[in-house]
Amino acid sequence: MLSVLSPTRTDDLRDLVAKVEAGERLDFDDGVRLFRSHDLLTIGQMADQVNRRLNGGQYVYFNQNRHINPTNVCAFHCNFCSFARPREDSPGAYTWTPEEIVERIRPDVHPRVTEFHIVGGLHPRLGFDYYENILRALKAAYPWVHLKAFTAVEIDFFAQLTGWDHETVLRRLMAAGLGSMPGGGAEIFHPEVRRRICPEKADADTWLSIHRTAHRLGLHTNATMLYGHIERYEHRVDHLLRLRALQDETGGFQTFIPLRYHPENNNLGRQLDWTTAHDTLKTLAVSRILLDNFPHIKAYWIMLTPPIAQLALHFGADDIDGTVVEEKIYHEAGATTEESLDKFDLLRLIKAVGKIPVERDTLYNIIEIYDKPIEYYAPPSRKTARGQVKITRIELN
Ligand code: V47
C-alpha cells in the first residue's frame, strides 16, 4: 500500500550505497545505474560521504584569480563553441598582444591574486613565440602569480605548429613560466560523440597522453567533461573512468570540473535546450563518487550560477573556482551570471551553506581559513532597484 510516510522509490541503490560506505570502487555499470536513477538525494549523500572521506567535508576552496583569453580567432570549428571566430576580420574577432594583456589586467591584479587562467583560440597565423611571450610578459610584470595556461588541445596545436613533440612544447612553456595546466578540451572522450562535436580536436588518447606527459614533467593539471548535449550516460561514465585510470597511473590531476553545456549562439545548440539543475547536481555527485582518486571536484560558479554552486557543495563539490573577473567562453554561450565575484561574495556564498571557506593558491596551498565571523561593508558599486547607491554592513558568521 502506498503511503506518504513510506514513499516508493523508482529504483533501489542500496547495494551501491553499501559499496561506497565500504570504500569500494564503483564500476562502469554502477556508474550508468547512478546516472539513470532519479534518486538524487541518495546519490548526493553518497557523494557527500566521499567528499567527507577525502576532504573532511566542511572546507570549500576558492582562489583570487583572473581569466585571460588572449585571442578568440580559432582554426577549429567545434560545434558547441560560441567564443571562436574563424578569421581575424570576422565580427567580434580580437587578438591582444602580450603587452596589451599586461596592461588590460593591471587594474585587477593585487597581491592576493595568485592565479592567471589562460586559454584561447588556436590562431591560424600566429607563431609559437606569441604564446611563449604571453607567459614571459606576465611573469615579468606579476612574478608572484601562478600561470595555469593552455589546454591539452592547445599544446597539441603548438606541437603541430612547431613540429616538436608534446614534451618539448611543454618544456619550452615551463621555461617561459607555465606553472600548471587547466582541464579544458576534454569535452567527451568517446569517439561517437567527439567526432560530432569537435572533429578537429586532439582525440581522447592524445588529450590523455599530453596530461600524462605533463604529470611526468612535474606539472599538476585539471580535467573537465562537457555534459548536457548529445552524449549518453554511457559516454559520461566512459569519460570519467578513463580519467580515473590515468589518475591511478600518475596522481597528477588536482580537480575535476564538470562543464554544463551552454546552448546559445552555437551550432549544436540550435536543437538543444539547457540541461536541468537536477542533471547538473547528479553529474557533480556521480563524478565525486566515481573519481575516488581525484582530490577535488569544482562547482564552477560562473557556469552553474551561484545558487546551484551552493547546492553543489552538498553534492560532493569542495571548490567553487575564484574571482574570475573577465569571462568570455560562457557569456558568449548564454551565461547570465556576473563575470566577476569579489572575495566577500565568495565567502558569503560558501558560509551561507554552513561550510568553511578556504582561500587557496592553484596548487591548493592554503592561504587563509575563514573560520571566524567576518564583518565588512559591501562596496558602493552595489545599487538598489531604484538605482541608489547602497553601502551595506554585512556580517558573516
Ligand atoms: O574546453 C566551450 C568549454 C572549456 C562551451 O581547469 C563550453 O580550473 C559549455 O576548461 N558550453 C574551457 N562549455 C573552460 C575550462 C575551465 C573552466 C574553468 C576552470 C577550469 C580549470 C577549466 O569550456 C572548453 C569547453 O569544454 N566550453 N564552449 C559551451 N557552449
Image (cartoon, rainbow, N blue to C red):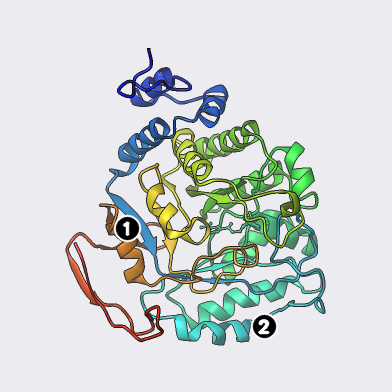
Report which residue position mark 2 lands on: 97
Q: Secondary structure at mark 1?
A: helix
Residue 270 found in image quarter: bottom right
Q: Give the residue displayed 45% in from the left and 73% down from the top.
A: 145
Using the image as rendered, state which of residue 249 and residue 274 is in the foreground.
Answer: 274
| Crowd around label 2: few <14 · some 14–19 · many ≥20 (10 Å) | some
Q: CA distance from mark 1 to mark 2?
A: 37 Å
The x and y percentages for residue 202 are: 74, 50
Position in image of residue 57 (x %, y %): 29, 44
Q: Quadrant of the C terminus?
A: bottom left
Instruction: Please state if 61 lies on the left or on the right of 86 as rendered.
Output: left
Image quarter of residue 377: bottom left
Horizontally, residue 172 falls left or right of residue 277, namely: right
Residue that appears at 65% across and 62% down: 333
First in sequence: mark 1 vs mark 2: 2
Residue shown at 35%/40% (left/top)?
51
Is 223 or 343 nearer to us in this picture?
343
Q: Mark 1: which amino acid? A: Ile
Task: Count neighbours of disc 1 (C-alpha within 10 A) and say few if under 14, some if 14 to 19, many if 20 or more.
Answer: many
Of 10 and 37, which appears nearest the observer? Answer: 10
Q: Secondary structure at mark 2?
A: loop
From the top left corner, tell me how far across and down residue 317 is, in percent. Answer: 40, 47
Q: Nearer the viewer, residue 376 or 389?
A: 389
- Amino acid at dot 2: Thr
Q: Quadrant of the N terminus?
A: top left
Q: Which residue is mark 1?
A: 350
